[in-house]
Amino acid sequence: MNNTPTLHPADATAQPAPAKVPSRRVIDAPTRIFHWLFALSFVGAYATADGEHWRLLHVTLGYTMAGLLGFRLLYGIFGPRTSGLGLLWRKLAGAPAWLRALPQAPSVTQINWRQGQNLLMALTIVLLLALVVPLTLSGYATYNDWGAALGGHWMGEVMEEVHEFFGNALLFVVLAHIALIAGLSVLRRKNQALPMLTGRVEGKGPDLVPKNRAWLAALLLIATLAFGAWQWQQSPNGWVASGISTEHQRHQDDD
């Protein structure tokens, strides 16, 4: 009697499950959700910068960027070391020494290009955060007609030009940041944007960020959505103006 078990055809062709690739957590959830909320807010604000029809949505997104910046500064001070502002500062503080070492290098191949790449990345991040301050302040002044109140119509136009200048400057830095990530992904043969989505990088070893703090990321998302809903409720027409624009109505009243 043959007691040899027979294999089902499906079992014969089944492949062993692939081994799980080890990874480490390098970016926590609050930092990641801040990054994407900040990016979406800027894209939306820049896209709605022209025309009175989208003005309230533009202003709402601008306030959101300011609030997100406040969160990032507080989190950079009180959060984990890997998200601290001091880490960015220490990277930038090494720029003078790296620049002085360039002419002293025996050959181009002996230059620490990785440090230079990290310096550029840190610089773009600092500029992204820093430019939000004059951008939102000039936007707030323009929205509330501070320029017209202080110096008349011409001053109001100057304030609008200042706001537009910082908006374009921030756009330039954003594009430079994206180009740098794309370039580093090619040079290092690894997707440099993926950790900002997953929070992890491939490799063995302990997590650089022991706690993910998903609860704080959820709170930040809820607060952002709640602010947008509150702004919607405050306006009788919602985020988008309907009918005759405010600017057109003002011109009619002047006539």
Image (tube, rainbow, N blue to C red):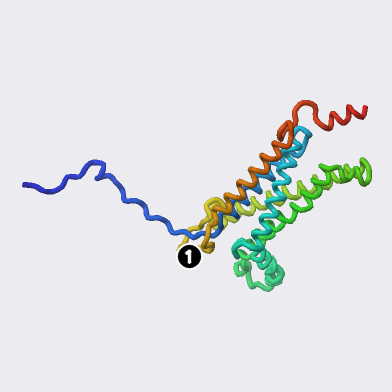
- The structure residue drawn at horizontal position 17% and vertical position 45%, both measured from the top left corner, is 6
- The structure residue drawn at horizontal position 51% and vertical position 62%, both measured from the top left corner, is 210
**Residue 18 at x, y = what percent?**
36, 52
Q: Is residue 5 above or below residue 25?
A: above
Q: Nearer the viewer, residue 86 or 250?
A: 250
**Residue 134 at x, y = what percent?**
79, 52
Neighbour tally class for label 1: few under 14, some 14-19, many 20 plus, Cα within 10 Å: few
Q: Nearer the viewer, residue 69 or 224?
A: 224
Indicate the quadrant where residue 85 lies.
bottom right
Q: Quadrant of the C terminus?
A: top right
- The structure residue drawn at horizontal position 63% and vertical position 61%, both measured from the top left corner, is 117
Indicate the quadrant where residue 62 lies.
top right
**Residue 108 at x, y = what percent?**
63, 67
Indicate the quadrant where residue 41 lies.
top right
Q: How many marks?
A: 1
Q: Nearer the viewer, residue 2 or 102?
A: 2
The amino acid on which the numbered mark 1 sits, given as a three-letter code, is Pro
- Please indicate whether residue 12 sits to the left or right of residue 200 in the image: left
- Please indicate whether residue 26 sits to the left or right of residue 254 in the image: left
**Residue 253 at x, y = what percent?**
90, 28
Residue at image mark 1: 206
Dot 1: element: loop
